[in-house]
Image (cartoon, helix red, strand yellow):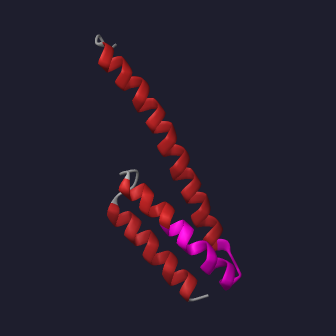
């Protein structure tokens, strides 16, 4: 167990950050699934910028790797373009 006040604070902070990251990651994954299952091209094109923004935010905060974010964005844009 931690012996310092700052270490105890860090443990509390890490837990809250972990929960926030988990929530944002799950929300983004659900948005990606919704976009992939969308049948209407116009609706998919409207959803795309929001989903791409969510992916960028995860990469910026190091929740996912930059390369994974780029791959996801590329595949989603190709998917929407081919609808």
- Majority secondary structure of the magenta segment? helix
Whether the magenta-drawn stretch holds residue 67 is answered as no
Residue at left 61%, top 72%? 47
Viewport quadrant of the N terminus:
top left
The answer to which image quadrant residue 38 occupies is bottom right
Q: Is residue 12 left or right of residue 47?
A: left
Q: Is residue 43 left or right of residue 32?
A: right
- Against 78, residue 24 (above or below) is above
Q: Position of residue 26 (x, y in %)?
A: 56, 51
In the image, which residues are magenta? Answer: 37-52
Residue at left 54%, top 72%? 49
Residue at left 68%, top 78%? 43
- Number of marks in the image? 0
Q: Position of residue 62 (x, y in %)?
A: 35, 51
- Against 7, residue 18 (above or below) is below
The answer to which image quadrant residue 51 occupies is bottom right
Q: Is residue 27 left or right of residue 77?
A: right
Q: Position of residue 5 (x, y in %)?
A: 32, 13
């Amino acid at each position: 167990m931690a012996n310092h006040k700052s270490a105890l604070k860090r443990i509390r902070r890490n837990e809250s950050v972990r929960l926030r990251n988990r929530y944002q990651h799950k929300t983004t994954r659900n948005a990606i699934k919704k976009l992939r299952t969308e049948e209407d091209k116009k609706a998919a094109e409207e959803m795309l910028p929001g989903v791409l923004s969510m992916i960028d935010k995860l990469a910026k905060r190091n929740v996912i790797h930059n390369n994974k974010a780029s791959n996801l964005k590329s595949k989603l844009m190709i998917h929407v373009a081919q609808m």
